[in-house]
Image (spheres, rainbow, N blue to C red):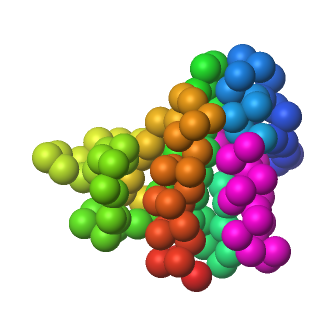
Amino acid sequence: EKIHYTVDDHLKSASPEAQKLFSVLKEQITALDESIIEEAKAKYIAYKLTTNFCDVVILRDALKIFLNLPSGELSDPDNIARDLNKPKPIGHWGNGDYEMKLEREEDVDKVMALIKQSYTYNK
């Protein structure tokens, strides 16, 4: 039998601060397009249209966000994303070649600017 995961399953082990951070981020991601689908997987929460453009892993005190963009395609002026293909490939749960960690609500806008690039790329 297939296990059905929920967003609440992911939020159980998160601190109240991380839960609030997720809530703020989720609201902004889903506001990008009414056809965005939120899908809880075993290890992450996927946001997608036809394919995932953003995967969120909920940690105890932060969020780890993966962007479904090939290496070299992200414009990251604040240098907040890590390229998981350079200098050598790093294994990870989400889709795409970029990873960011979100720990503070004041960084949501910077993170959203990068998420929007992945959204546009995968549209």
Compared to 2, does 43 lie above or below?
above
Determine if the magenta segment contains residue 25: yes
Q: Where is residue 50 in the image (x, y as percent from the top left)?
A: 66, 78
Count of residue discs? 0
Indicate the quadrant where residue 76 lies.
bottom left
Nearest the viewer among 54 and 92 is: 54
Q: Where is residue 46 in the image (x, y as percent from the top left)?
A: 66, 55
Q: Residue at x 58, y 82 (%)?
A: 123
Q: Give the range drawn in magenta.
A: 24-45
Extreme residue in the left direction: 87
> Quarter of the image containing the N terminus?
top right
Q: Where is residue 42 in the image (x, y as percent from the top left)?
A: 68, 41
Indicate the quadrant where residue 53 lies.
bottom right
Q: Is residue 94 visible?
A: no
Determine if the magenta segment contains residue 88: no
Q: Position of residue 70 (x, y in %)?
A: 34, 67
Compared to 95, does 105 lie above or below?
above
Q: Residue at x 75, y 29 (%)?
A: 19
Nearest the viewer among 120 and 66 is: 120
